[in-house]
Image (cartoon, rainbow, N blue to C red):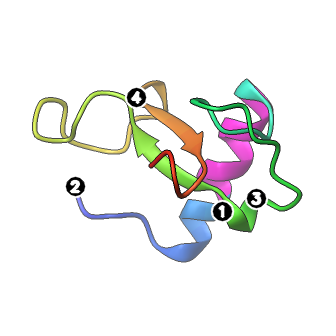
């Protein structure tokens, strides 16, 4: 599955922020804007292909 387009990525980030809070999953850094967040796969795509939200978390750039 290909990487989501920009519009879908915004939706994914909003959904993850609603589920987990608008902060980095790893270090707890709170995002002032979700634009600064990256999306990370908990289990690598080589093991579980795709963009299933159960396998995604928000991360800051240094942690990702």
The dominant secondary structure in magenta is helix
Could you tell which of marks 1 and 3 lies nearer the N-terminus?
Answer: 1
Q: Are marks 1 and 3 in contact (CB under 8 Å)?
A: yes
Dividing the picture into quarters, in which one does residue 52 lie?
A: top left
Q: What residue sits right under mark 3 in the picture?
A: 34
Q: Which mark is residue 10?
A: 1
Tell me the element at label 4.
Answer: helix
Question: Which of the two discs, 4 and 2, labels the residue nearer the N terminus?
Answer: 2
Residues 33 and 11: in front is: 33
What residue sits 20% from the left and 41% below the top?
45
Quarter-wise, where is residue 57 in the image? top right
Query: Residue 37: x, y in percent?
Result: 65, 56
Mark 4 Cα shell of 10 Å, populated few (<14), some (14-19), many (≥20): some
Q: Nearer the viewer, mark 3 or mark 2?
A: 3
Q: Residues within 10 Å of mark 1 (few under 14, many from 20)?
A: some
Q: Which residues are magenta?
A: 11-19
Q: Earlier in the sequence, mark 1 or mark 4?
A: 1
Q: Position of residue 23 (x, y in %)?
A: 75, 38
Q: Quadrant of residue 38?
A: bottom right
- Name the residue that disc number 4 marks: 55
Q: Quadrant of the N terminus?
A: bottom left
Q: Residue furthest bottom?
A: 6
Near mark 3 (Cα within 10 A), the count class, few <14, some 14-19 or many ≥20, is: some
């Amino acid at each position: 599955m290909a990487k989501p387009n920009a519009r879908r990525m915004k939706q994914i980030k909003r959904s993850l922020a609603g589920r987990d809070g608008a902060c980095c999953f790893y270090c707890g850094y709170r995002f002032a804007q979700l634009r600064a967040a990256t999306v990370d796969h908990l289990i690598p795509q080589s093991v579980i292909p795709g963009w299933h939200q159960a396998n995604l978390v928000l991360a800051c750039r240094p942690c990702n």
